[in-house]
Image (cartoon, rainbow, N blue to C red):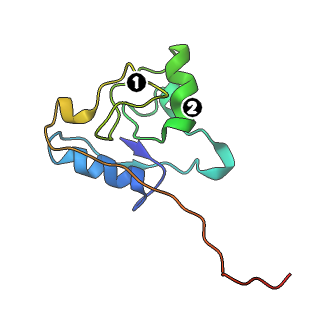
Amino acid sequence: MASSGNGSTIHMSGELFKIADRHQHGPCALTAAARPRSPILLAGQVQVMFDNIPTCAEHVKSGKLRGLAVTSTTRSDVLPDLPVVADFLPGYEASAWYGISAPKKHAA
């Protein structure tokens, strides 16, 4: 299983999945400089990858990658044909929220 790196939300999604299914984590060195990380999956260097939808959706839609499921509790609007992992592993949910913050007063 590949992810963006140790301790990332993607890694933790895989670790949660690993509780029910045995596989080994391999952090991927291809981060911001080489997005998407999908080339390692396309090249057959790994068999499974947990990734964010924006970095892999194009490959799933084109048929270059086979999407298996999404980790949220509901189907994705971007990839609506993919089931949720909880359909196969009841109780599974892994999602993240990203925000931007800044000081209330900023000196220009």
Q: Is residue 107 above or below residue 93?
A: below
Q: Residue at x 46, y 26 (%)?
A: 44
Name the secondary structure under disc 2.
helix
Q: Is residue 13 above or below residue 90?
A: below
| Tag of residue 100 | none
Residue sitting farthest toward the top:
63
Could you say where residue 58 lies in the image, as x and y percent from the top left?
A: 58, 25
> Viewer-nearest of labels 1 and 2?
1
Q: Mark 1 is on which residue type?
A: Gly
Could you say where residue 103 lies in the image, as x and y percent from the top left?
A: 66, 81
| Tag of residue 39 | 2
Please give left or right for residue 62 compared with residue 6 in the image: right
Cα–Cα gap, marks 1 and 2? 15 Å
What is the quadrant of the N terminus in the image? top left
Q: How many marks?
A: 2
Mark closer to the chain start, 1 or 2: 2
Would you name the residue on which mark 1 appears?
67
How crowded is the residue under tag 2: few (<14 C-alpha within 10 Å), some, or many (20+)?
Answer: some
Q: Residue at x 39, y 62 (%)?
A: 7
State the residue in front, 15 or 90: 90
